[in-house]
Image (tube, coloured by chain):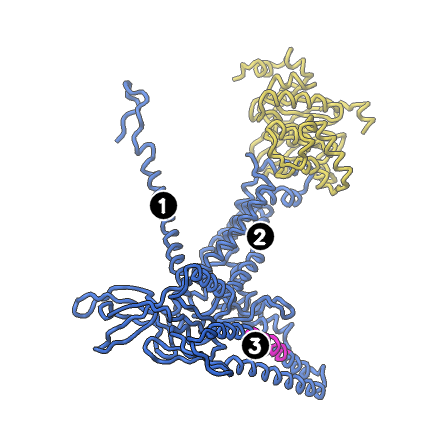
Chain colours: A yellow, B blue
Amino acid sequence: MTDIIDNPRPDFIRVDDFSFYYGAKKAIHGIDMAIPENQITALIGPSGCGKSTLLRNMNRMNDLVENVRHEGDIRIGGTSLYDPSVEVISLRKRVGMVFQKYNPFAKSIYENVIFSLRVAGRSKKSELDETVERALTDAALWDEVKDRLNDSAFGLSGGQQQRLCIARAIANQPEILLMDEPCAALDPLATLKIEELITGLKDRFTIVIVTHNMEQATRCSDRTAFLYMGKLIEYAPTMQIFENPQQEQTEAYITGRFS
Amino acid sequence: MSSEVSDPKKPFATTGRSRKGEPFVWLTAAGLALGVAMALGLLLLILIKGGSSFWPRRIEVMEVSNNGAIERIAGYITQENERKNADGTIHEEVQVFRGNRDLNPEAFRFIDRVDIKSTSQPESFWLIERLEYGPAIAEPVSLTTPEGPLNAADPAFEKKLDSILKAGRDARKQLLVIERKKIGAISRELEELGRAEKAGSVSPDIAEARRVQLQSSFETLQKEAAEIRAKLAESTFVGRAADGREITYPAGNLLGVFASNKASFSERVGEMAHRISGFLTDEPREANTEGGVFPAIFGTVVMTLAMTFFVTPFGVIAAIYLKEYAKQGLMVQIVRVSVNNLAGVPSIVFGVFGLAFFVYYVGAGIDQWFFSDKLPTPTFGTPGILWASLTLSLLALPVVIVATEEALSSVPRGVREAALACGASKWQTIQRVVLPAALPGILTGVILAMARGAGEVAPLMLVGVVKLAPALPIDDVAPFVHPERKFMHLGFHIYDLGFQSPDAEAAKPVVYATALLLILVVVILNLAAILIRNRLKKRFAVSSF
């Protein structure tokens, strides 16, 4: 993986003419996009535009929904997610995910962080301890919880719980981190903290973040994709999207004149 | 009905009562109050009736006119009521417990208030508990001992009586050991010997020799027992009932005496505690109307715990499959409706099913395969505690399944997704995240199931409960756990005393006391389960969303 960091691939995640259906309803219409390695890519767009659906396809979370199907392909590092040889479980180990609503488990802080190691069958105490410290430090939570690692995760504040969820997602060192509106349920201060954290993580992870918050996209993302009605309208470096949008719909959306 | 909110002069006019819903609030409160009142009333009735039967009451000696003659009756009043005579006059009458069943045909007697000429509470009268005939109420007269007679007025009398009572208690313990344990062991060995001989694994000569040996040790034990019995009967207690008749009884078979009218308050409390502990720890006597209910308590608790042990894994696993794995569709819906309908099936039907399936089919099959040497005497092919707990666990199964399904659905989807996103398989997600989060809800279902099972009587009568089973399902005879044994149950005990007893009046206090006990046992079992659940809840703290 180290050589990859020296030499980021511009199309690490390749979405290739990808369409997705919930039953008869087509939620995504043939999207093509390349997401570069070690960058933060933001997906923006009005509710129901398909950005979360696209994100949740990147670790095949949508497999859980009944009666869905897809066309086209998504490739990570050149391998198709839908290749028969791909095991969903090992895929999800490479692609971590943080959800809109913080969702720690009814376990201690410690057990929450090492959950992905536990399910992978790793139980060496020193490794687990190391992982907890590293992941919590990365998630900027270590100093706040290091003295109460065995307390229930529900005793933390909302922002802390979401950072715990980030620590949990990165504990097993995935290559990609998917974030589905990670700050939607948080107050502005907690949001700021998480944004700082995300920016700090991009050296080591490829981050795809769905957000409703324009400022958040400008503040932390390198590239931004604007989706509308299941179609990719515009995809460009963030500065360009916000300062000089090429499409009328994009401009209308980011300036709030959207109808 | 209500003032208009849009009245411009009263922009914040109060809404009408009915619109605020107050009458409905009152209605729901009234409903709750009624329910609570009924439950409390029932508990209070049982508590008073059951509790008071243990309180040593004062003995009244009444002079009653009976067709011109005067009769003296000693006893205590158990009930007062009014009776309408044929001519329309109302009589006040009292029910008196006078004991002395060896002298009187009936231990209880109704007496008209007007016939009672005088009452007194002489200190000389005792309440005497005996092994047979129920309690006696009499004045002590003398003790006939091998060393000679001893008059009640003698200062050494009470001391001597106490030592006889103590010796009697010890002797009865010895008898129990000899007759139940040692002789029981001999008869078990004889049985096994017979089977081994029939199977050919022991030669007839050796078997015969061993049999003679066992027979001689049996005779020795029997002689020992007879000696102890004779010793119990060597002193005689002589008392005088209120009507002057003499009561003689082997002093060794007296269980206890209590001079009720002489006793101070603290002595009474002591006597009550003694009676309660006897009730809880003794075996029943006299067709269950006397003595304790220990085997019934033990049977109830063991049966309930065994039932919980069977129903919990079965119900939880079934619910997990139904909720998490089965493809939701018509089939699953049919299964679910059937499970829910099971909850509405009358419990006696489960009893019939248990008898037909567990006892006659599974049990008989087990006998055929594993205990064929004992046939035609059935081992498992007869009602027993194992079949009773299995039958009840079927009865309680819907409760656990429904509660578990509810608990599983209440686990937020986000938590499942989080686990899956961490690379957990579906089973790992269920096992490590969903089940712990659902545990309190599942345990609530288990508690409900336990309560349902502990209070059930009807099906038990078909699959294992009996009137008297002093041999407990768990004891110190190898292999220590006897799932094939029949057992006693508090619920059945109540039914048996109330409806099958030779003397319904004598059984009444025991019925109430047993009912109280059954409620207490169920409450204690439930409280224990609730405590466990709350501990788990704390460990897996309630989720915040």
Closest to the camera, between mark 1 and mark 3, is 3
Find the magenta span and give its range: B171-188
Q: Quadrant of residue A79?
A: top right
What amino acid does circle 3 point to?
Leu
- For the C terminus of chain B, give its image quadrant: top right
Q: Dot 3 lies on which element? A: helix
Closest to the camera, between mark 1 and mark 2, is 1
Based on the picture, tell me whether residue B244 belongs to the magenta stretch: no
Q: Main secondary structure of the magenta part?
A: helix
- Is B286 on the left-hand or right-hand side of A147? left
Tell me whether marks 3 and 2 sit on the same chain.
yes
The picture places residue B464, in percent across and down from the top left corner, at: 51, 68
Residue at position x 48%, y 83% in the image: B148
Q: Quadrant of residue A62?
A: top right
- Compared with B170, B345 (above or below) is above
Residue at position x 71%, y 34% in the image: A81
Chain letter of disc 1 in the image: B
Residue linked to disc 1: B33
Residue linked to disc 2: B318
